[in-house]
Amino acid sequence: MSVLARHAEALSRLLGPGKVVDDPAITRLYRRDPLGFEGGEAVVVFPESVGDLSLVASYAYRHGLKLYPQGSGTGLVGGSVPGDAGVVVSTARLNRIRGVSIVDGYVVAEAGVRIGDLNAELAGRGYMFPVDPASAPVATVGGAVNTGAGGLRGAKYGTMRDWVLGLRVVLPDERGTQMFLGCYTVKCRQGYDLVRLIVGSEGTLALVAEAVLRIAPLPENVVVVLAFYRGLESLMETVVDLRASGVQPLIMEFMDDKTVEAAVKAVGAPFRAEGRMLLVGVDVNREASGRVLEWLVGTVKRRGAGLVYQARSLGEAEEKGLFQVRRSLFPAQVKHLHTLLGRPGARILTYVEDIAVPPSRLVEAVEELRRLEEEYGLPTLIGGHVGDGNLHPATGFDASDESMRRRVEEWFMEVMRLAVRLGGTVSAEHGVGSLKREGLRVELEARGAGKALELMRAIKRAFDPKGILNPGRVV
């Protein structure tokens, strides 16, 4: 019997029946991510309580067993699959909403609650959780906490670090120590902000069991405009106009012309869609809807938008399919790359970047990305959250082609260096994982903060002295 199999038997006795799986046909599903990367051998455990998490953490500490926390496995930086042999800690059964307080403005949700399900529960009370990654229907609260996720509403509401009030966590120590960090109030001072430290730590510091999340009222109404431009500068001038107007859009999304074409081929569109795409949503009261929509349409047309589609509400926008092209960004990127690079039996790996630059530098960023596409000879599709300068260029390669792999890895680093040169960051919302560790070093050294990596490693040792939590990620 292998060492991992013996650990599986011991964990099964510890946790009880039905909570540990070591069948390779099943565990392989937890060793792969959406980009096509596959990790090492693993046992998968399914804790059903914070007590179960504590038992797993304690056992792993005593035996030096590596732990890989995992939500729905939608991560895009090589951080959601096991690196070496170890235990995947799935939060799938930690899926209860513990309570909602409208008066106090928070919801308590376990780590495995899906954000889509959370918002379905809150919508019945007239509220929402504003962070909405593209994978929101399946993305989990714990995964969003660990990655510091953002999303389409990031232009107005920011990322997870702005919406987490408290966390119930388990430490990888002898006792599997359980702690509640933070508060149930917006104002909260407890010395060093350990909640903010864990948000975005990518499962390297503690196992997240439960989160206290701020909630916001649902907008009374949202007007939506989808516009297509021939020129990139005209589109970006529209973005500048909107940001300078004093109106803070709820949604402001971008896709370049090649990407729009690929998306239409991949999933279709219920209308003519060509050129560079700008999708804008503004939340308003119902009485102002007509006036704001008219102003929004006038703004995009004044800057040269050719094709313009509009909706007086989110419901109407959904009926007209105005979000369809933008929502297809990732599947379009993957399908396009598979079509271009695929051959019978090929395994295509996709690299999706996650840089952010100041919105004033977006034109430069997109133009440089196209230059890099030509320089490296790599098909590149570009889209992202233009309201906060977050871009997601993507390319890929046949896993059997080592020369192309090296070229893609060089491109990946050049994209990160580009972001740093333009005053931006190498990772906006996906995290650092294993793919962006060198990019993180480049960014920190460029800012004169190289010592920050030493501080991060010291923090990692303080939380995880044996280095068993998601090793090989971030630092």
Image (tube, helix red, strand yellow):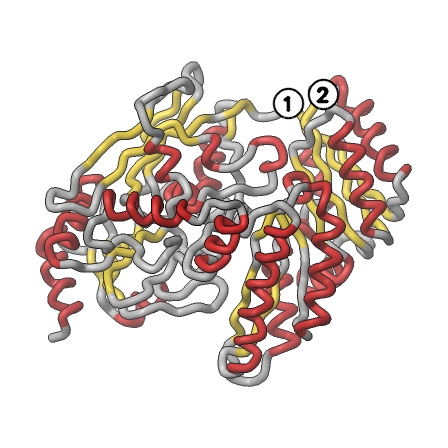
Residue 140 appears in the figure: no
Sequence-wise, which precedes: disc 2 or disc 1?
Answer: 1
Name the outermost residue toward the front.
Answer: 448
Report which residue position mark 1 lands on.
220
The quarter holding residue 79 reads bottom left
Residue at x 59% of width, y 79% of height: 342
Residue 443's mark?
Answer: none
Name the outermost residue toward the bottom.
Answer: 344
Locate the N terminus by quadrant.
Answer: bottom left
Type of amino acid at the residue the image marks with label 2: Arg
Q: Position of residue 87 (x, y in %)?
A: 24, 60
Type of amino acid at the residue the image marks with label 1: Glu
Locate the C terminus by quadrant.
Answer: bottom left
Does 227 appear above or below 269? above
Number of numbered discs on residues = 2
Report which residue position mark 2 lands on.
286
The quarter holding residue 433 reads bottom left
Front-most of 365 and 183? 365
Judge the density around disc 1: few (<14), some (14-19), many (≥20) Cα neighbours within 10 Å.
few
Residue 177 appears in the figure: yes
Q: Secondary structure at mark 2?
A: helix
Does 347 appear above or below 209? below
Q: Position of residue 204 (x, y in %)?
A: 32, 49
Does 1 appear above or below 212? below
The alpha-carbon separation of the residues under discs 2 and 1 comes to 7 Å
